[in-house]
Image (cartoon, rainbow, N blue to C red):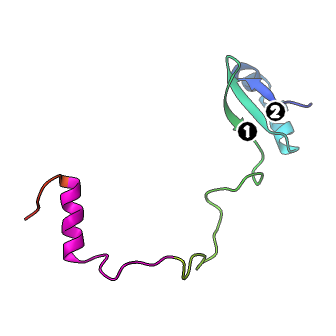
Amino acid sequence: MSVNKANIYEFRTHFARYAKCVREGATITLCDHNKPFAEVRPLGTTACASAKRPIGLYRGKIVMAPDFDSAAVNKQIAETFLAGPVQ
């Protein structure tokens, strides 16, 4: 079964058939009244946000100012958010 798109009712009615297609590598675009709103695809076909990243990936690439946590900087941030001077 070669499927690209499925409306919600069709997908719900034939879920097992669509699940088999996804297991075989197909990507299915879900539609509501023929308007696409989501994709169902096998895991591993896209980079997942929860994928493990190596420790130290950005070592030496991120630099923080020496005074990033000083009282003066914190006061300036507070005044920015509170829209006025902070005592």
Q: Which residues are magenta?
A: 62-81
Q: Amino acid at mark 2?
A: Tyr
In the image, residue 15 above or below residue 84: above
Residue hosting label 2 = 18
For the N terminus, the quadrant is top right
Residue hosting label 1 = 40
Front position in the image: 44 or 13: 44
Task: Where is residue 56? Give x, y as percent.
Answer: 58, 80
Label pair 1/2, CB-CB below 8 angstroms: yes
In the image, residue 63 above or below residue 43: below
SS at mark 2?
helix
Task: Where is residue 33? Give x, y as percent.
Answer: 67, 16
Task: Where is residue 47? Give x, y as percent.
Answer: 70, 56
Which mark is on residue 58? none
Front position in the image: 56 or 10: 56
Magenta span has 77? yes
In the image, residue 11 above or below residue 23: above
In the image, residue 46 above or below residue 6: below
Front position in the image: 19 or 79: 79
Total of numbered circles in the picture? 2
In this rendering, would 80 be left or right of 18? left
Q: Quadrant of residue 41?
A: top right
SS at mark 1?
strand
Residue name at image x 86 percent, y 30 percent? 3
Dot 1 crowding, Cα within 10 Å, few <14, some 14–19, many 20+: some
